[in-house]
Each structure stands twice: as C-alpha cells, then as structure tokens.
Image: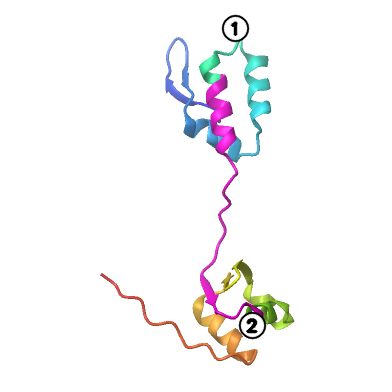
Amino acid sequence: MLADVESKGGATVYRFTPGSVRRALDSGRSASDLHDFLTAHSRTPVPQPLAYLIDDVARKHGHLRIGAASAYVRCDDDTVLGEILADRRSAALGLRRLAPTVLAAQADPASLLDGLRAMGYAPPPSPPRATS
C-alpha cells in the first residue's frame, strides 16, 4: 500500500511516490507508522529522500476535509439561519453553517425547499441549471 510495484522478476522493484504515500496515509497510517514499518523491514537505513517524501506528504495530509453538500441556503440575515439550525425540524436536512450567511445541506435542493417551506419559510425555488 505504501509503494507501487514497478517491476517483477528476480527481485520486485517498488516505487515510492507522493500518491502511494498518500494512499497509505488515507488508510489510517501515520507518518511515524510508515517510518517504523520501513525501518523494521529494511536491511539498510531508510534513504533520506524517502524519509523526506513521507514527511512532506504527511505534513499536507488531512488539512482539508471533504464532505457532501448537495444544496445550500444563503441569507443576508444570519439570525434567520441560526433559527433554522436551532429548529428540531431542520435535523433531517443535515444543515451545517459554512459561513455567517450560508448553510450547507445534505438534502437535495428539492427536499431542502420542501423542508424549509414546511418549517414556515418561503424560499424561492432555485432556477434551473443551464446545460451546455
């Protein structure tokens, strides 16, 4: 998982790349886990460029988080958005505050519209998306 097989034959050759190191980190390993694994399984000291590669990729890994948001609510009055978040009926919409005036929803736009209207709000429907 930490390296890609480059060639097989009398000896298998593995290539360590930023992508292969990222794959190992994505699977839950830490940089120290990777260093420990290589140290335990190598007959020679781990090459410095490989150690640097692991540390460089690990330093950037996990700083950004990706999540699903299929619709959003935007309102210039952040108090209204706070009221929506505090309302128990909004729980099914999976709302999270992205900014003072923006909520992201895990619900699709039509469900978000229906849910907000059921709560007594009157957002207009989104205009249809243009296709090219």
Q: Nearer the viewer, residue 31 or 5?
A: 31
Q: Which residues are magenta?
A: 51-79
Query: Which of the 4 image quadrants contains residue 111?
Result: bottom right
Residue shown at 57%/20% (left/top)? 51
Residue shown at 52%/25% (left/top)? 53
- How far across and down, in percent of the image, does residue 67 sit? 57, 58
Q: Is residue 15 magenta?
A: no
Quadrant location, the C terminus: bottom left
Secondary structure beneath dot 1 equals loop
Q: Nearer the viewer, mark 2 or mark 1?
A: 2
Q: Nearer the viewer, residue 122 or 79?
A: 79
Q: Amino acid at mark 2?
A: Val
| Label 2 crowd (10 A; few <14 / some 14-19 / many >=20) | few
Residues at marks 2 and 1 touching, judged by CB atoms closer than 8 Å: no
Instruction: Give the residue at mark 2.
Output: 80
Is 19 drawn above or below residue 106 in the view shown?
Answer: above
Residue shown at 64%/82% (left/top)? 80
Query: Which of the 4 image quadrants contains residue 28?
Result: top right
Is 27 drawn above or below residue 5 in the view shown?
Answer: below
Residue at the top extreme, as displayed: 44
Instruction: Give the residue at mark 1.
Output: 44
Separation of marks 2 and 1 at Cα, in angstroms = 63 Å
Quadrant location, the N terminus: top right
Q: Is residue 63 magenta?
A: yes
